[in-house]
Structures are given as C-alpha cells and as structure tokens.
Amino acid sequence: MPDVSAKTPAGQSSPALSLDPAQVRISQRLETLKTTESGLTAAEAARRLAEYGPNALEDKTESKWRRLLNYFWGPLPFLIEAAAVISAVRRDWPDFGVVAGLLLYNAVVGFWQDNKAANALAALKKNLAPRARVMRDGAWTTIPAAELTPGDIVSVAAGQIIPADLLLIEGDYLSCDQAALTGESLPVSKKVGDDAYAGAIAKQGAMTGVV
C-alpha cells in the first residue's frame, strides 16, 4: 500500500507541529471572550460590567446595631448580666445600678472605639483602592480595578498589584510574588501564555494580559 502520510520539504516541520501552544491558548481565549489585542470599546466594557458585575469581592460589613449587640454577648457580658439579674431579684438597687452602669459603659466605649477603627479602615481602603491600566477604544487609560471586565486588555509592570486574573498575551518577562496566594516563597517567572493571579505583586518586568 502506498505511504499516504503527510510529506513536508526537508528541514521544514509540519504546520500542525509548529503551532505554539501558548499562542493557540491565547487565540482561543480571545475568541471565547470576543475581544482582540486592541481591547474592548468603552460601550462594550460598560455592557459587560453591567452583565458580570464589578471586579471586586463583595464587602460584607456588619451593621452598627449588630456590632453594638455583640458587646452584650459573650462570657464577660454574661457574668455582668447575671450579676445584674441577681441584684434585681434581691432588690439590691444600688448594686444593680453599678453593675448595669458597668455593662453599659463597657458596651458604649467598646462600640465607639470599634466604630472609629472601622471608619478609619474604610477610608484607608478607599484611598488605596487599586487602579489598572487598560486598553479601551484602542488607547491606554487608567481606571479603578473594580471596573475591569472579562475581555479587557490590561498592562502590568513592576511594583503593581495584579488587578485581576490574567492570561498573559504579550511581553518578554514578568516576575510575580504570589506567596500570599499559593504559599510559594520565591517570585515566580511568567511568560506569554501563563496565568497571572489577582492579588499577586509584580516584582520585575512588564507584560500585557487579558482578563
């Protein structure tokens, strides 16, 4: 039977064998996300942001009333409350007043300090909110990282926090410290076709990725 296997000129490899796996993965990702290396238009980004929601974890804050009630719940408050009940049953009103006053004082002071710390932390988080350099309408611009959406093309460089999970599509080199995410003690070298994880810190280099 004649040999019908694919033939290629000497010194040349078959096209199927010359495909770069990283480029194949990038092409598939861009096609899946319906985006290009020129990024999304502002209108399309707004539509996707409305569909998928912000690029941020939900901030679950406890209500002020719940935080206040927590100061009446626990081993120490229970002891003070028990002493107040015993004083009331015995009609020892001076002791009851002292114990109840101690309970209220502890709750009010603790709540005031806790609320002050919570407000300071919220202000700090607002001022330190990460920003991202993204390609919109074919031009680079800087936006809050929470406004990134699937299909955005993002640029990251040394000293920046990776603003979202990215597939790196262009650039020579990026070294990322992802110890807080994976426990790896040393920075990890990234190349085209690798993933960069949100929250990692870029230590060296600069690359472009797709969200």
Image (tube, rainbow, N blue to C red):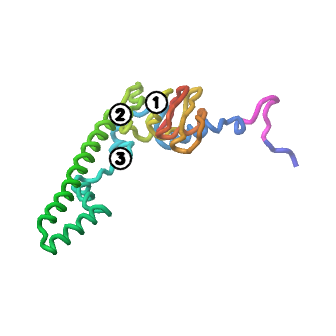
Distance CA(mark 1)–CA(mark 2): 12 Å
Q: Secondary structure at mark 3?
A: helix
Residue at mark 2: 128
Distance CA(mark 3)–CA(mark 1): 27 Å
CB-based contact (under 8 Å), mark 3 and mark 1: no
Q: Is residue 153 magenta?
A: no
Residue 176: x percent and y percent? 55, 34
Precedes in sequence: disc 2 or disc 3: 3
Residue 172: x percent and y percent? 59, 26
Res. 51 mark: 3
Q: Amino acid at mark 2?
A: Leu
Q: Amino acid at mark 1?
A: Gln
Q: Residue at x 56, y 44 (%)?
A: 183
Precedes in sequence: disc 3 or disc 1: 3
Res. 160 mark: 1
Q: Which residues are magenta?
A: 6-14
Q: Nearer the viewer, residue 25 or 101?
A: 101
Precedes in sequence: disc 1 or disc 2: 2
Pointer 1 local density, CA inside 10 Å: few below 14, some 14–19, many at least 20? some
Q: Is residue 83 above or below residue 53?
A: below
Q: Secondary structure at mark 2?
A: loop
Residue 181: x percent and y percent? 52, 44
